[in-house]
Image (cartoon, rainbow, N blue to C red):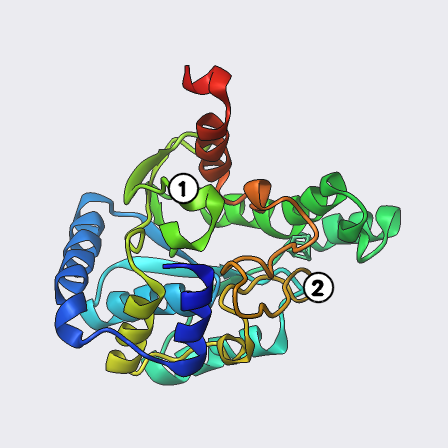
Amino acid sequence: MSGTEAIVTVFRGPHQPDTEIAAKLQALETLLSEAAKEFADLRLASSLAAEDNVLFDVVQRLGLNIKTFTLETGRLNAETLAVLPALQARYGKAPEAVKPVAAAVEQYVNAHGADAFYESIDLRKACCDVRKVEPLNRALRGAQAWITGQRRAQAATRKELPVRENDDARGITKFNPLSDWSEADIWTYIRRFDVPVNALHFQGYPSIGCEPCTRAVTLGEDIRAGRWWWEDPANKECGLHAGNINRASSLQSPLKSA
Ligand code: SF4
């Protein structure tokens, strides 16, 4: 699906007939159920976006023993934060909010300024390290495996995204169970199971991150065009999914692919 089609999907709301996602839904439920049996400590990383709320809904519906957390970076939109109480009201539980180390944030802000991420890729990555990567590493400490809501269609860096991979940096297994799901599949699920969603999805935000680093996109733009929009699309990841950058780099480099 092109970026244009994806945005049309979000705004106009067409969706797949239920029968068309039945096979994918069954595969998703089987994968999560078997992963929960295989790994006693399996964790779901949620950005509180549509894909992650789909996964959270499956986990709750099936009563799976999968702990869910979200990275509360301190720079999220109010609409994103509002998803937490919405999930709590719907399921009686919500992802645990994992926050950055206050002293590390203070050090970054004092040294560079609160919005220094606009000035260079290094300063942007340094901010993501403090607000996202370190908290993620902390949230995954002791886990045997983790789950993300990434999809192949979301970005140039995700075209080769496998359903299951080794997270080499942490020495654990990583699942991307929505890897082959389309935007339409996600919204079909959301309607069918009445899943709470981030209001920003209806304001032109198919992909949602921190408030100052995410903007709405327009028709014809890629799904993740609004994330760090001032940077090269081939390298736009925040460090949470280092394997994506490595896979994308190996595809682009004739030296590495030789
Ligand atoms: S997305 Fe932006 S505000 Fe959020 S951690 Fe990364 S650089 Fe900082």
Residue 126 vs residue 2: left or right?
Answer: right
> x, y (%) of residue 233?
58, 46
Numbered tag placed on residue 142 in the rendering: 1
In the drawing, does residue 239 fall left or right of residue 197?
right
Residue plotted at (81% across, 51% down) = 116
Quadrant location, the N terminus: bottom left
Res. 45 mark? none
Q: Is residue 162 above or below residue 115?
A: above
The amino acid on which the numbered mark 1 sits, given as a three-letter code, is Gly
User: Picture coordinates of residue 139 (x, y %)?
Assistant: 48, 50
Foreground pick, 45 / 179: 179
Residue at 71% x, 47% y: name it: 124
Mark 2 residue type = Pro
The CA distance from mark 1 to mark 2 is: 32 Å
Which of the two labelled residues, at mark 1 and mark 2, occupies the earlier sequence position?
Answer: 1
Q: Is residue 63 above or below residue 159?
A: below
Residue density around tag 2, few if under 14, some if 14–19, many if 20 or more, within 10 Å: some
Residue topped by disc 2: 212
